[in-house]
Each structure stands twice: as C-alpha cells, then as structure tokens.
C-alpha cells in the first residue's frame, strides 16, 4: 500500500510539472511524458488499467480514431509519411489512456494552477518583447527569441499560442464568475491576469485563436446565464462586438490581421497566394480527392502525393501541401467519411460526458473544450501540432474521467 501511494504521488508531481512545462518547451514536456509512460508500462495493475480504459466511451472513441490511422497504412502508398502521421496520432492511442488512468480528482486544481502559472510567465515575456525590453532577434542570453516585436510569441508560434491562451483565460474567468468562495486577493489576481491575457491575445497574430477567444466568451456567457438564453444572447451581441472594435482600434496587429482576411477573400480570384487564399485552395483541391475516395480515403500517408497530382492540374503556380490546414479536410482525404465520423465521435462523447459531471468547472470546461476545438479545426489541423494536441489530451484525461467509478 505504501509503495502504491508513493507511486501515485510521484505520478501527480510529474503531471503537475508537465502542466507547467506543456506551454513552454517541447523537449521538457516530452522528457516528463517519457518518464510517465515508462513507469506506467512497467508498474503493473494492468487489469485495473484496462478496466478503466474500456469503461470510458471517450477513450474508446479515441483508440478507434488512432487505430484507423494504423489500419489506413494498408492502402497508403507513401508508407513513410503514413508512419509519420501515425506517430503524430500517438497522443490518442497511448498517451490519452495513460493520463486517464493516473489523473486524480484532488490534484486537478494543481494541474490547472501550474498551467496558468506557465501562461502567466509566457505572457509576461511576450509583453517584454512587445515593449522592447527583450530583443526578438537576440532574445535573452540567446534564449526566448520571438517572431518579431509586432508578433511577440516566445515559446511557440502564434498558431498554437492563442488557442492555449484562450483556455487559460477561460479558466480565470470561470473562477471569477462561478466560484462564490473565491477570496478577494484571488479575485483581484484572476481579474488582473484575465485582462492581461486578453490584451496579450490581440498583440499576437493568431487569428484562429482570436476566433476561439470570441467563441469562448460567448460560451462562457451562455453558461453564466444558464437557462436565460435571451439575456445571454443580448449580452453576447453587445459584448463581443465591443471587444472586437476595441481591439481593432487599439491593436495594430489585430487590425492588420482582420484587414488581411478581408483583402484575401476579396482578391481571392486574382491572387490565391495569401494565407486565407491558400487555405481555400487547399480545401477546393482536396475536395477533388475526397470525391474519388469518399468512404475510406487515400490512406494515412497519401495526402501529399494525391494533393500534388491535383495541384499540378488545377493550380500549378501554387505550392504543394502536406497538410490542408483544416483538420476535417485532412481526415476526409486520409480516412474518408469513416475517419471523419470517428473524429467527431470523440467530441460527441466528450460533450455527452460533460453534462454528467457534478463539478461545475469540469462540466463547463468539458463542454467548452470540444466546442472550441470544433471551431478552430476549420482553420488548421490542431490535433497534429504538439502544443495544442498535448493540451487537448491532457485536459481531456481529467475532464471526462468518471472518478466515482474509478
């Protein structure tokens, strides 16, 4: 018993440390993950672990999704790229089950605190770059380099940073609005950092994350007003445009990013070589592949090769792609409708499980997380990238675990 308790405590320390490292460093987070996986694989209690895994519909859906990628290697021609895709999907096939079986409910508050602390550190450095204290090119003693002073992302690209920042803001706002026992000091600190994080959202260039931010605000408002949908809709229709126009008037980078989207769409027929234009082109060309392989796709590794064939015919002046920057399109090309249904089933069971949670935070965040990812996956393959996928899997491991049964 002592040995078991000691091992469990060690797991929790590792998970808390991982929650802190998760937004800061790939190598650091991966080192902790390797340690967790190694201990888990050789720690015994396999029957108990299996019982917990097969008792979760969210986990079963995740395992099926991973298994489809493995099976998709059978009809893929580019086996090497297929193995690369399977490697990127290992979060769903191995890491999710491991996290699920070792997370403990009393430690959730420590996971979240460590995560928010890391975001606070990141946002602080981002502002130091923005104010010119840290040079974006030289960094700080050669470290902490950023994209540039107008897009001050330190540890990761703006594509990953803003969605992760959105989740941190949600956690702070949820505590402010729903924790009736929140102490005054914590209320002040959470309010301060929620404002700081929100400002940080609009001095960086992640448009998908900014869309996710507005979606998060809408979800939180509806959760706050609960059954008063009309009142919630009125607040959303006033607050979100207010935040949008305030950010547009005060943030040059946000203004530029909004204007570029409008321009990209306006000139799409004349100039497809833009961020938005390329995404539209990727989707249109990918649809040609999907129509020919609607049910099982072209296999886990054949997107680059098949896209190149279509691109040479339809848009030869534009670059080829290994990723259509749309999770739904990517899965449809690789695994067809079967793959898409499998992906969506994960989100379906997450949403369904969220309503069963008695804890307010787990219930609300358990609903918000899949809804927000369903939104941003239209603009990029967010379940392929390290930072966003790890966050999604880590949070899912305790948001959808039925602690009463385990």
Image: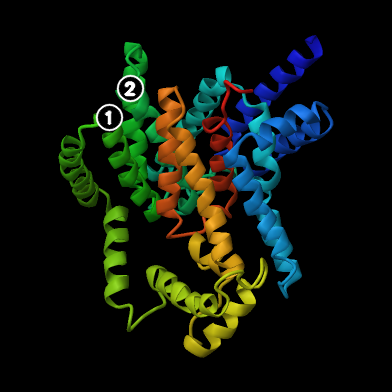
Task: Answer with left or right where residue 232 lies relative to residue 155.
Answer: left
Q: Is residue 13 visible?
A: yes
Q: CA distance from mark 2 to mark 1?
A: 8 Å
Q: Find disc 2 in the rendering and name its residue.
A: 178
Q: Quadrant of residue 310?
A: bottom right
What x and y, as percent, mark residue 164?
A: 47, 42
Of callouts 2 and 1, which one flags the residue occurring earlier in the amino acid sequence? Answer: 2
**Which quadrant is the N terminus positioned in?**
top right
* Residue in front for this viewpoint, 95 or 159: 95
Report the number of numbered marks.
2
User: Residue 267 in the image: x percent, y percent?
Assistant: 29, 78
**Secondary structure of residue under mark 2:** helix
Quadrant placement of the C terminus: top right
Whether label 2 touches label 1, CB < 8 Å = yes
Give the camera-side residue of 391 and 360. Answer: 360
Q: Which element type, helix, strand or loop, lies under badge 1?
A: helix
Q: Which residue is mark 1?
A: 224
Number of residues whose C-alpha sits closer than 10 Å to that of mark 1, classed few (under 14), some (14–19) or many (20 or more): some
372 lies left or right of 242: right
Give the answer, above or below, for where 174 lies relative to 341. Answer: above
**Residue 259 position within the rendered picture, expressed as x and y whole percent measured from the top left:** 26, 63
Question: Could you say which quadrant of the image residue 404 lies in?
Answer: top right
- Is residue 153 shown above or below 379? above
Give the residue drawn at x 24%, y 30%. Answer: 225
Q: Residues within 10 Å of mark 2 (few under 14, many from 20)?
A: few
Q: Residue at x 46, y 27 (%)?
A: 357
Looking at this view, is 130 or 319 the one in front?
A: 319
Residue 333: horizontal and vertical position, in percent? 56, 70
Whether residue 133 is visible to the viewer of this picture, yes or no, is no
């Amino acid at each position: 018993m002592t040995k078991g308790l000691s091992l469990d405590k060690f797991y929790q320390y590792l998970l808390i440390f991982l929650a802190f490292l998760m937004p800061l460093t790939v190598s650091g987070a991966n080192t902790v993950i390797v340690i967790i996986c190694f201990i888990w694989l050789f720690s015994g209690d396999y029957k108990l672990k299996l019982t917990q895994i097969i008792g979760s519909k969210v986990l079963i859906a995740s395992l099926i999704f991973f298994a489809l990628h493995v099976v998709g290697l059978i009809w893929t021609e580019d086996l090497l790229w297929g193995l690369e895709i399977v490697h990127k999907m290992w979060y769903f096939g191995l890491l999710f089950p491991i996290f699920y079986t070792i997370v403990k409910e009393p430690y959730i508050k420590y996971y979240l605190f460590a995560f928010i602390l890391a975001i606070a550190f990141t946002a602080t450095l981002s502002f130091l770059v923005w104010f010119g204290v840290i040079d974006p090119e030289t960094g700080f003693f050669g470290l902490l380099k950023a994209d540039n002073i107008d897009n001050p992302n330190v540890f990761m690209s703006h594509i990953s940073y803003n969605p992760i920042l959105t989740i941190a803001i949600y956690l702070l706002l949820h505590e402010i609005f729903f924790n009736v026992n929140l102490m005054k000091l914590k209320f002040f600190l959470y309010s301060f950092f929620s404002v700081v994080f929100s400002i940080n959202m609009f001095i960086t260039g992640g448009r998908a994350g900014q869309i996710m931010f507005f979606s998060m605000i809408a979800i939180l408002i509806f959760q706050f007003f609960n059954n008063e949908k009309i009142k919630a809709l009125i607040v959303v229709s006033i607050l979100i445009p207010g935040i949008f126009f305030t950010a547009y008037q005060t943030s040059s980078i946000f203004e530029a990013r909004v204007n570029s989207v409008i321009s990209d769409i306006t000139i799409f027929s004349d100039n497809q070589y833009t961020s938005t234009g390329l995404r539209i082109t990727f989707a249109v060309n990918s649809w040609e592949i999907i129509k020919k392989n609607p049910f099982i796709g072209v296999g886990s590794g054949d997107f680059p090769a098949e896209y190149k064939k279509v691109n040479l015919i339809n848009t030869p002046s534009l670059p080829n792609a290994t990723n259509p920057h749309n999770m739904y399109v990517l899965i449809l090309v690789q695994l067809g409708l079967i793959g898409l249904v499998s992906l969506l089933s994960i989100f379906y069971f997450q949403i369904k499980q969220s309503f069963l949670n008695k804890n307010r935070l787990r219930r609300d965040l358990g609903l918000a997380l899949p809804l927000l990812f369903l939104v941003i996956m239209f603009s990029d393959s967010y379940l392929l990238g390290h930072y966003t996928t790890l966050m999604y899997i880590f949070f899912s491991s305790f948001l959808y675990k039925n602690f009463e049964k385990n």
